[in-house]
Image: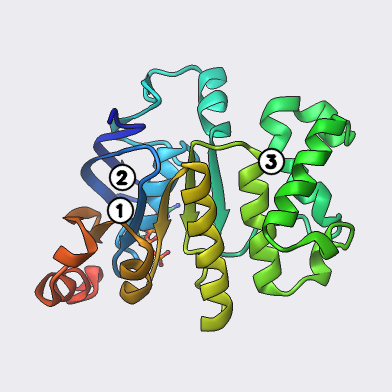
Amino acid sequence: MAAILQVERLSKKYSDGTAALSDVSFELEPGEFAAVIGLSGAGKSTLLRCINRLVEPTGGDVSFGGVRSAKASAHEVRLLRRQMGMIFQGYNLIQRVSVLRNVLHGRLGYVGPVRGALGLFSKQDVEEAKSILKRLGLEQQTYKRADELSGGQQQRVGIARALCQRPKLILADEPIASLDPVTAKIIMDNLHRICREDGIACIVNLHQVEVAKTYATRIIGMRKGKMVFDGRPEDLTDRMISHIYGESPDKE
Ligand SMILES: Nc1ncnc2c1ncn2[C@@H]1O[C@H](COP(=O)(O)OP(=O)(O)OP(=O)(O)O)[C@@H](O)[C@H]1O
């Protein structure tokens, strides 16, 4: 199967000299569910943000659906980005507006900022947002303000907003780091189920190896900005886990 995403020798050095990402290369097939694991500071967030160009890489390239991102115009980057839904640890919802409106924000890349700011979404967009909320068990919350919801519900809204983009790829940056284990399981079950049902590829940054092994078809291990493991969960040995998590990247 042709890769949907090609990450080629991707590197990021921040302006203070921190080498957050060094020469990372991998390919992702449509529908793959990959987990990125590694110590805090290993470069997991930087990797996701270089893929959707929220962070500008300093080396290498990302090709998505055959379009190379390094040479893409600002317009092309917007087109690429709207096909990549992003889910954040802190949910990143607009707290004072309704759940439905938050989900519709996923359509902004299609309707444009002015229509979006005015809330001029089509009836079809509204119906689609409502049906996504239903799929995530949030029907009853549709007209509540985002800040009236629990953390787990807010994260499901985050997933719904990403889905409203009709993405081919979801990038989830530690989506369960702020949640208790029971709620975390609900989030991971939903994310995994929907990606599988809709054939959406997913890269999810996780702190918990066991969670990564439970859901992912592929695990990428990061250490000090480098990819030190890329393989199936069953091939992730204890020895490799020790290597990935062995010591703080700052201590080397
Ligand atoms: N804007 C920035 N400017 C300078 N250094 C940065 C910036 N963002 C991240 N870094 C540094 O880059 C390295 C990788 O950070 P990154 O957030 O990608 O790691 P991470 O694996 O996602 O960590 P965590 O699990 O704590 O979120 C760290 O040393 C971090 O301090």
Q: Indicate left or right for 58 with 241 as reference.
A: right
Looking at the image, how many numbered discs can be counted on the residues?
A: 3
Q: CA distance from mark 2 to mark 1?
A: 5 Å
Say above or below: 5 vs 67.
below
Q: CA distance from mark 3 to mark 1?
A: 32 Å
Q: Residue at x 18, y 73 (%)?
A: 241
Q: Which residue is mark 1?
A: 18
Q: Residues within 10 Å of mark 1 (few under 14, many from 20)?
A: few
User: Where in the figure is residue 232, as x and y percent of width and height?
Assistant: 21, 58
Q: Which residue is mark 2?
A: 13
Q: Where does ligand 1 appear, by image quarter?
A: bottom left
Cβ of mark 1 under 8 A from ligand 1 = yes
User: Where in the figure is residue 137, as x and y percent of width and height?
Assistant: 72, 63
- The answer to whether the residues at label 2 and label 1 have Cβ atoms under 8 Å apart is yes
The local secondary structure at tag 2 comes to strand
Q: Which residue is mark 3?
A: 106
Q: Residues within 10 Å of mark 2 (few under 14, many from 20)?
A: some
For the residue marked with disc 2, what is the amino acid? Answer: Lys
Q: Is residue 121 visible?
A: no
Q: Earlier in the sequence, mark 2 or mark 1?
A: 2
Q: Quadrant of the C terminus?
A: bottom left
Cβ of mark 2 under 8 A from ligand 1 = no
Q: Residue at x 58, y 32 (%)?
A: 82
Q: Quadrant of the N terminus?
A: top left
